[in-house]
Image (cartoon, rainbow, N blue to C red):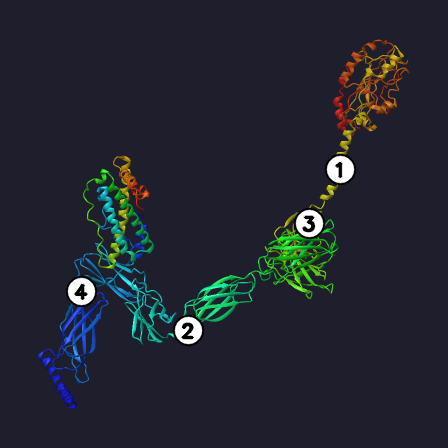
Amino acid sequence: MQDPSTLLDPYIRLQGLHSPVLQEHCRERPGDFPSEDALWRLSRQDFLQTLNTTLGLILRMLSALQQDLPEAAHQQAEMNVRGFGNNIHCMAQLLRGSSDPKAAEPTQPGPGPTPLPPTPPSSTFQRKLRNCGFLRGYHRFMRTAGQVLRGWGERQGRSRRHSPCRALKRGARRTRPFPEIRRLAPRGQPPR
Amino acid sequence: MALFAVLQTTFLLALLPLRTYQSEVLSEPLPLTPESLNVSINSTKQCLHLQWTVHNPDYHQEFKMVFQIQISRFKASNVIWLENYSTTVKRNQVLHWSWESELPLECAIHFVRMRTMVDDARIPAPRLWSNWSSWEKADAQNSLGDHPLYVFPKDKLVEEGSNVTVCYISRNHQDNISCYLEDVLIYGRQLDQNVWAFEFKNVSFIRKTGTNFYCKGQGDPEGVVLLVSKVLEEPKNFSCETQDLKTLTCTWDPGNDTGLIQLPSYTLFESFSGKKTLCKHRNRCDWQVTQDSQEMYNFTLVAENYFRKRSVSILFNLIHGVHPMAPYSLFPKSVSATNATVTWKVYSIGSSSALLCQLQLLGEGKVIQQHNISVRVNGEYLLSELKPDTEYMARVRCAYADHFWKWSELISQNFTTAEAAPSEAPDVWRDVTFVSGHPTVTLFWKPLSKVHANGKILFYNVVVENLDEPSSLKVLSVPAPANSTKVTLNQSSYQICVTAHNSVGPSPASTVAISGHPGNENVEEGRMNGTEDGFPMSWKPQSRNATGYVVEWCDSPQHLPCVLRWKNLGPTNTDTVISSGAFRPGVRYNFRIYEISTKRMAHLLEKKAGYLKELAPSYNPKVNMSNLTSHSFTLSWKDYPTESQTGFIQGYYVYLKSKTGEKCHRGFEKTFLTDNSVCCKYTIDNPDQKTFVVKDLQPESAYEFLVTPYTSAGEGPLDDFRKVTTPDEYSHILIHIILPMVFFVFVIMIICYLKSQWLKDKCYPDIPDPYKSSVLSLIKFKENPHITIMNVNDCVPDAIEVVNKPEGSKMQFVGTRKSPTETKGTKPAYLDLLPTEKNYSGPGPCICFENFTYNQAASDLGYCGHFPVTPQAPHCQLGPLTSPENLLKTLEQSYMNSLGEIPAGEANLNYVSQLASPMSGDRESPPTNPPEPALCSEYKMQMAIPLGLASPARSENSSLSSTALLDPREHCH
């Protein structure tokens, strides 16, 4: 999911946006996705919540872009986002059920405006550029989310007491709705 | 009424000039001037939409009028369009007119005005234009925001091949705007201070998502997407049909996709009923048949998109368009070896209609039977004349029986008939070899064809019957798929029957008879040529009762073991063509033709050999060269097999190349090789000749030769010339002389070596040891006290022999055989030191040392004999002396005592130097003072003679060597 060749590149090819001039302006717009700093500042609970919300936004955008994307790329991206969203949802549930103090940390300054679907531009050309920037932001956001999750794993190594992973494990031992949960993101596995 | 009309017209005609006059003079608006002109903008369609009214309270009837419309761009004076619009105007009617701009309306302000003129025949000329209306302004830029750059038209939908104009408005005059069409920088035309336009002609389709045009200044790029649509095609192959008389299905080929996401719409309209339906698919549409028994339908299919509308119509009779659904449940039942019954079902059409079904039977992909059956619901048919153990396919299709139009889809079912006993005897042949006089028969048979096997062959039965012992039967069962077996027989006659068996039973038997004795194999082999079709051959029958002929051969004779093939021919055949896919050019095939007797015995008729196509030899024989002389040499290639070649060897070519470029010898002909070198070629047209003598060559010349065979297809490779150089003409003579000489010398040396002892004895025997001399024993035996051995020291030389040697003269061995002339120059002179023989008259004892080896001949001649010796004294005393010194010492040490016993007075010793000893020559030329015969002792030098000097000295050199050894000083002490 971090790899632009999975979604952004097919979109650029299909829409004819491969010129350097247009590539220069195929930029993520501020506010489309939470910034990296904002994500790092979030508590784990809020991070997962933000992630979940953003993934919902992405799914809606993908649905709107169905006609503008190659069918295979669109389907694959949608499946990836759905699968990742499921994992995040489960993690959030486990964190919520754990006694990890970090999970209950007060939320620091928020990630900014809650992501909203970008307003459809007036013309097709602007919509193309807008969607292009959105997809670039999507890949950037997924990469950042992966880094944050990897950061969790590294912190766990340094301070096991405050390990969300341990918290997740505790939660998993209690509930264990899915045995595979231990192999998911708490270890810092970045989304692909 | 007519009168009224005339009056009205007259009135109008009178009135109009007046009105015109008033407008010109009074500038009053005419009543027919357009009113309420309203201009609206349709940006999507780039249209200016005009709306106005003509208010004339004086007239209530319709008039035909002309409206002249002017359109200006940017400013009123810049008129870009002028058009007369004619229409019929009613009183207070609101009129509409639209104008499509090639330039997006957002890029320019437009001004519109119009004037009118009555163009009605009821109103006589002159017809004058009304005044122009005031300019109406159409400004689409009012709706634009404050963005610095705008590009229009937004999302323009254009058809491929059309022209389109794109423009941009830049609010910042300082901005440097660059515009691109699909990454290509393009330049436009400036329309106004801040408006630029770009005209694209004959635009083409690039992608479904549109062609991108964008401009970029300081800020973000602004652009538009031109959605280019391919031209909508007219639907093709429009037709309708029904499967059940309830629903009509119309289909068509929509042609190429327009390439846009927005698909064209397809509408089906039926004119008789006036109904229409919007089709859900782009190539098919369903139409429900009404219950009012409508039989005829007039359908029109309309395809429509943004740009075009295409339509196509057909007139359709419902009964004539029945295409039944495919039958179903097709099954074979009661399948035997030759018969099968198949059943199937159909969907009924209507209540009483029947279907015509066609049943096809296919074997190996081909239709072999076809039957038409009328069916209402269930169909059944008995298929006969089937072949056992054969897979068939039954397939059925049906059509509307009342009016055939189209077959339904096919359904098919495979089935296999049951097996039956094989219908034909296997084709059997044999190969007989005799081992120790006993025939060993290898039976071969060909697998039965599928047609004749009638099932899977499980095994073959081989029954061997001894005809001489009818009760003796031997049965072999050979499991399939073996196709041969070996039987060892004795010298009786046998009949062998072979049958093939499947699960049902055996085939008819195939019989061969074997004689216990070898037949006549001494049949001369004939030759034949193959053709593209194979090997044509014919033969002469030997017997009138032949039941057939068999031709046998090996498919790949170059590979062992032989893959035996045979061909059975009837008794009337005396020729055939043997063909096989295994035949290859350049391979020799041997055919044997047998005649089959009534007793199924095979007799060899003919042998034939041939090539499907002869090829040039692929390699040359290995040639041995021999008998090389200065003028000829011999070539031979005896181990070159001709039978395994790629063609019949017809002979050989002998190529000879001479480096001197001499002319070709007799029998040779000049030829050119592939490298353009000149060569002499000799043709040997006898393939059995495998030796050749190359003659008439030049001595000491280099030649190259090559022997290559040739067939009817050509000669072998010319790439392995061997070199030979003829020797010198006289060298062989030298060899004939020198070699025997060397051999002779060698033999002599060997003989000398082997006979060295004998030669030694003969030429230089050992010097006898005086101590062991028989003289001593004789002395002892006689006990003569007067006889003793002389002590040399006691000898008082009484004479000195002076040898006058002329310069250059050489010393001669004493006793050597010299010619008188050789010895003339060496006359010794004797000096008497003591009173000598002249004074000595009486006899006295004289001891003569004689070495027979030294001079045997002289001894024999009695050189000592002239010295008087007492009868008791031995003739000579013999003894070995290896050197003069040893001799003296020996004499001093060994015989001193003995000599001492001899009284000096009795022993009158005359010592004479050995160098002056009498020689043969001396006898002829006696010295001046020859010694008197007296008892004297003569000492002759004893020495060993080297082997090489044993032979008589022939040269002066030999004398010189002797001189060095016989220094006289060594002898006189």
Tell me the number on the disc at residue B639.
3
> Image quadrant for the N terminus of chain B?
bottom left
Q: Secondary structure at mark 4?
A: helix
Q: Amino acid at mark 2?
A: Ser
Q: Is residue B742 above or below residue B643?
A: above
Q: Amino acid at mark 3?
A: Asp
Considering only order in the chain, which callout, 3 or 4, is on the residue closer to the N terminus?
A: 4
For mark 1, name the chain: B
Tell me the number on the disc at residue B140.
4
The residues bearing labels 2 and 4 have C-alpha atoms spaced at a distance of: 68 Å
Which residue was labeled with disc 1?
A: B741
Circles 2 and 4 on the same subunit: yes
> Image quadrant for the C terminus of chain B?
top right
Residue B154 picture location, percent across and down: 23, 62
The residues bearing labels 2 and 1 have C-alpha atoms spaced at a distance of: 128 Å
The residues bearing labels 1 and 4 have C-alpha atoms spaced at a distance of: 135 Å
For mark 3, name the chain: B
Which residue was labeled with disc 2?
A: B353
**Mark whose residue sits in front, 2 or 1:** 2
Q: Secondary structure at mark 3?
A: loop
Tell me the number on the disc at residue B227.
none
